[in-house]
Image: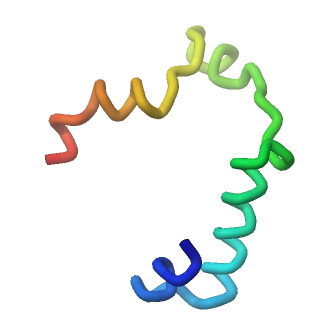
Amino acid sequence: MRDGLIAQGAEPWYAEMNAEMTLAIRMGVSFTPSNDILFLLGRAPRSIETYTADHKASWR
């Protein structure tokens, strides 16, 4: 991930920070689920898979 970001023009410090944050989230040590979406929108949050499937046509 880090190398891919750098290849796309990201600064090395940013690529490293982004890669470390992503790893921490994947490992479950940096993310605490909240009820913010429920509170703000009045509905349960959707998964990223559901969101992308729902909006697939707008990304073409």
Count of numbered badges drawn on the protein: 0
Q: Is residue 57 left or right of residue 33?
A: left
Please tell me which residue lies in front, 58 or 24. 24
Q: Position of residue 19 (x, y in %)?
A: 66, 69
Q: Is residue 54 left or right of residue 21?
A: left
Residue 9 vertical placement versus 5 (above, below): below
Residue furthest out toward the right: 29
Q: Position of residue 8 (x, y in %)?
A: 40, 83
Q: Quadrant of residue 20?
A: bottom right
Residue 16 vertical placement versus 28 (above, below): below
- Please report the residue visible at 54 percent of the width from the left and 72 percent of the height from the top: 1
Q: Quadrant of residue 24?
A: bottom right
- Please report the residue visible at 61 percent of the width from the left and 79 percent of the height from the top: 15
Please tell me which residue lies in front, 26 or 11. 26
- Please report the residue visible at 56 percent of the width from the left and 10 percent of the height from the top: 43
Q: Which color scheme is applied?
A: rainbow
Q: Position of residue 25 (x, y in %)?
A: 73, 49
Q: Position of residue 14 (x, y in %)?
A: 64, 80
